Image (spheres, rainbow, N blue to C red):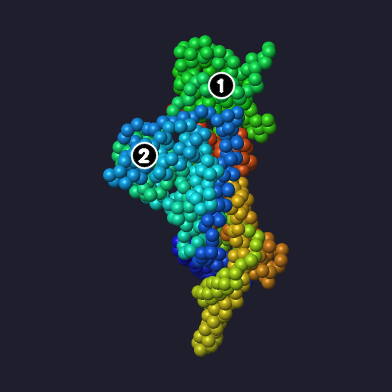
Amino acid sequence: MRWRQSLVIVAGVLAILAWDVSTNLLANIIPMRRAFWPVLLVVIGLLIAYLAGAQRDSERRNSSVDLDRVADDLAETIAATLRNDEEQRRVTQPAPLPVRWHEAGDGLADHPGNVTRTAIGSQGPALDVDDRLERIATVYGRIPSRRLVVLGEAGSGKTVLAGRLARGLLTERSPGQPVPVVVNVASWNPSVPLREWLAGKIERDHPRTAQRYAGRQSIAAALVETGRVLPLLDGFDEISQQLQADALRQLSEASDSPLVVTCRPEEYTQATLTSTVLSHAAVVELEDLDLPDVLDYLSRTVRPESEGRAGMWTAVVALVRDDPNGESATMLREALKNPLMVFLARSIYSDAGEADAAELVDSHRFPRASDIQRHLVAAYVPARYRATGSRPSWRLDHVQHWLAHLADDLDRRGTRELAWWQMADSIPARSRALIACVPLVLVSLAFWTLVLSNFVMGLNFCVLASLLYGAYFVAPGPPPARVSWTWRRPARIVVRYARNGLLIGLAGGLLLLGPAIFFSRPLPATVSPLWQAAAYAAFYALGPLCGVGFGAIVGVFAAIASGLEDHVDLTRSTDPAQSLTADRARSLARIAVIGLLLTLLAIPTAGWWAGIAWAVPVSALLVLRDSAWMRWLLFVRCWLPLQGRLPWRVAAFLNDTHQRGVLRRSGAVYVFRHALLHEHLAATARNTRQRHTRRWSPRNRERHVAAKL
């Protein structure tokens, strides 16, 4: 794929040179001829720098990695991440909710003998899986097949249970045992093998595991293939409904692999009807919370009652105690039957402390339990911005508008994960290409006008270059990369990069430099044909010679660039801010290396300051093509805020929403705290867009104009 892109660039550069040379000869523009040599060398330099940089370290093999040590480090990282997530969710404050489950009904689980791995003709032991949240790791350990399906309605605590299971397994884990990894499975397409998809997720969240190991596979793939990873697949119901049966079928085929799946009951039942039950898996279903337990929990989240001062939940507790079967108590029991709604109620009333919890039992305001739930979801974001001690940096209506845009964009792209390097994909592909060409046109016109004094040729160059350059931005952007300022590189890598620079420089000089001399410096007609042939032969020989020297220079710079290698400490959790900072360092390092090369090329003809003045923007444009950070800077930090779809300080905004509990981190990406919150915000954005469309429809526009008149 990289070499196809290289061939496209070669063809584009040849087209640009042919266009410029032919136009130059026809117009007989003397200044262009004088400046042609440095321009040509720069174009060749850009081409060689790109091709040399495209030689990634995928050829490098590392078979000496200790997978057990990597797995232990990965376990420490995941344990720290889960601990921080539970602290932010306040799962154990003041005490865990009493979440219970029972064995699912008939028709959802596999045969008991398959679950217990009992031999044919033998009587297997009875399997007891009924228990509560604190003992989930113990219950899982009692399942011989180590395959479990957890069913529960939206908000019933499936994600929290998966996290608690992972923490329990990590606490009991011994060296060499599998590492539990919780991943949201919504983005999995069953056409991709689960192990391959899972390895990609681990590589993204833990970049060190993306290094090569024993051939072409990564360390993450090796961990998955050797059974050192226990996948906890959360959100199976979020997979596209058309793909759920195929996904369940693929999971069933890998019957020897331990795993845990969480899903809503309706979606899992439907998938089993069109496919099969998950082979060798026990199935449990989460139960509703008891209202007395819920009210006891909520009462303990605020200050205790004192003489002359009633607690936040005192009136609610008294009403339910006096009339437990009344209409208000029944609706409240239905509304607060799952942990999500209890968490929202705590955030809105106990934490914010402004609203009165007694309004929840007002049957006139909330005639149905669903009305209470919708109120809790809608009031969560405002409550989080009221509850936090620090003053918000943005207006609440703006915050809700930006969050609605993010949720709606994720729905359009069919994902739940908010990756900073994919936020630019909310801009249409054609618009991205046009926006990216703006700095290219400005830099090119400035160069051709101020340095070469040829505005017309600059316009010609901008047209052709924009067509070639804009094509890079039609496809989605690249993922982030990392560098480390360490220069300990094996000599073989330096030699390989230098060799590549020499070969590509030789080809570039032969194909471009010789023909350019031929067309830009025609010999007088008085020279005899024999001497003309000798001169042209010398011109073509000069091309390869220049290519060899130039390729050697580029090879040295490519070797220096190869020293900017990724060395990530796996014991440190990777978050979005870290990946953004790492990609920024990599992009700036590449700009510095390429800019220095271009400056050295420009010094003989333009001098130091002029060389730096044009080398910096040109190198930045070159790096922009495949830099996640520079795309983020152009599209997300500039264009989207100009349209009012995001704030100017996007990274600070995302971090603030995470600190306030609206978003949560999942490795290097953000995820909305819950799917119901995501769906509510996305629906808000769609409703706003529909109202705007109806308001400015042709008929309504005519009415508006008529009313003004």
Q: Mark 1 against mark 2, which lies toward the viewer?
A: 2
Residue 197 placement, left or right of 419: left
Q: Residue furthest left?
A: 121
Marker count (numbered): 2
Helix, strand or loop at disc 1?
helix
**Viewer-closest of 367 and 100:** 100
| Image point (28%, 44%), residue name | 121
Quarter of the image for residue 356 reads top right
Residue located 62% across and 30% down the image: 385
164 w.r.t. 54: above or below: above
Q: Earlier in the sequence, mark 1 or mark 2?
A: 2
Q: Are marks 1 and 2 in contact (CB under 8 Å)?
A: no
State left or right for residue 382 relative to residue 131: right
The spot of residue 19 in percent (x, y) is 50, 66
Label 2 Cα crowd, 10 Å radius (few <14 / some 14-19 / many 20+): few
Determine which of the numbered discs, if any, sits on residue 296 in the image. Answer: 1
Where does the image place residue 619, in percent across and percent down from the top left? 61, 60
Q: Residue at x 50, y 35 (%)?
A: 135
| Residue in the picture at 68% in, 13% down | 307
User: Mark 1, residues whose alpha carbon is within 10 Å: few (<14), some, or many (≥20)?
Assistant: few
Taking 586 as reference, is 154 above or below it? above
In the rendered view, would you say 368 is above or below 202? above
What residue type is disc 1 on?
Answer: Asp
Q: Is residue 12 left or right of residue 445?
A: left
The three-letter code of the residue at mark 2 reads Pro
Location of mark 2 (residue): 125
x then y, percent, for residue 312: 61, 18
Q: Is residue 575 visible?
A: yes
Is 268 placed above or below 297 here? below
